[in-house]
Image (cartoon, rainbow, N blue to C red):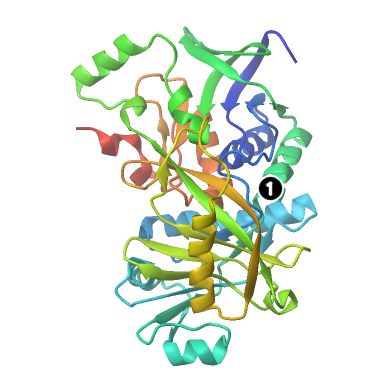
Amino acid sequence: MAGRAEYDIIVLGVGAMGTACCLELARRGERVLGVERFTIGHALGSSHGESRIFRVAYYEHPDYVPLLQRARKQWLTLQEQAGETLFHPSGGLWIGPPDHHLIAGTLDTAGRHGLPHEVLDAGSLVSRYPFIRPMPDDVGFFEQDAGTLLPERAVTAMARLAREAGAAILDNTRALHWREQDDEVIVITDRGEFRAGHLILSAGAWSSDVIEPRGSVDELRDAERRGSSAPGGLALRVSRQPAVWFAMRDPIRFRPRVTPCWGVARAVDSFYYGFPCVNDHGTGKVSLHFAGETCDPETLPRRVRPDEIAALKRFLDLTFPGVYGEAVASSVCLYTNSPDGHFIIDRHPIHRRVTIACGFSGHGFKFAPVVGEALADLATRGRTDLPIGFLAAARFRA
């Protein structure tokens, strides 16, 4: 594959969104090349960590719901095609004060879209889940359609299916720069130069490094004078998000078929979350969804600190007494945060042969199949019928 090649579309960044996009394009008969800096399914970005929550009643914005309903069907189809478990339909349980955004926003979205759910007071929570110790004023929201995705399995399965459909995927290949020239886009990598009619940028935490071609400063200034906002001015913020696996004292009791994934709100601007035991090691992953420390994906500390582990353990001992033992493993995930916390999926405002997907802000993985479909539409048709207008980059224009 090294050297010069011709493709219809190049996808730069082959994590969750990139593999889904490669798969969708290959199945449409497009000549597609995926370029990934690391190995497929690596643990350096945002598509690792054994488990991801899938939920439909979305507190972040009700407009996400139609995309999530489509994505859930796509995950189940992908699971069947892959011949392995990618999704546990375990249900999801969200707990907190009724005025916390996790609860209030989720209830609002469920009501707007008529989504099936149950609301439990603190007493009902304890009756159904005797291992939980809610606060007296807590309410619980149980969502039947929620569940647990397995990210590494999902990414590698989508890459495998994409290759089987005809996609070429180069991993361990670093993109050095790209440029738009006449009727093509040229991508220069450390393994050669590749040309295509269109380029899709889905580089996750490295998006700010690749979202503009080399030598585009004058174009950006021209765009600013015209009143448009180029993606490079979006000020994406990468944050460091620790996750810890704790030994479970009775892991059989907390398998996906009997225990939901969960979120518990204990502070205004964050909530803890965790999963049933989805591995053979008898451990459960727990983390905190919050505005983590700003970091550089090249230089961030990837070791989870003792104080971060201790904070999670204190929460677990109060809320799930007797369920979790000592910490046995940890990992760092990266969020790539947009200015408003919502995704950016759009054609590039300057470069007509480029489509961008970035700023998934710590809640994007579950959308991967439908994002892949939307990106394929934008790259091949210049538009999509999927309801992603609220995710356009144009919302950041001055």
Q: Position of residue 36 (x, y in %)?
A: 64, 28
Which residue was labeled with disc 1? 152
The residue at 51%/31% (across/down) is 299
- Residue 207 appearing in the image: yes
Using the rendered image of the protein, determine whether residue 55 is visible from the camera's viewpoint.
no
Left or right, 157 with respect to 337, comes to right
The C terminus: image quadrant: top left
- Residue 93 position (above or below residue 158): below
300 vs 41, nearest the viewer: 300
Q: Residue at x 38, y 61 (%)?
A: 270
For residue 297, above or below residue 266: above
Residue visible at 33% across and 60% down in the picture: 269
Q: Which residue is nearer to you in this view: 153 or 66?
A: 153
Task: State the image quarter where residue 147 is shown.
Answer: bottom right
* Total numbered circles: 1
> Whole-percent x and y of residue 61?
36, 57
What's the amino acid at mark 1?
Glu
Residue at the front extreme?
306
Q: Under tag 1, what secondary structure? A: helix
Place residue 101 in its image quadrant: bottom left
Percent across and percent down for residue 377 are 51, 36
Q: Residues within 10 Å of mark 1 (few under 14, many from 20)?
A: many
Q: Nearer the viewer, residue 327 or 46?
A: 327
Q: Position of residue 341 (x, y in %)?
A: 36, 48
Residue at 72 percent of width and 74 percent of height: 251
Q: Quadrant of the N terminus?
A: top right
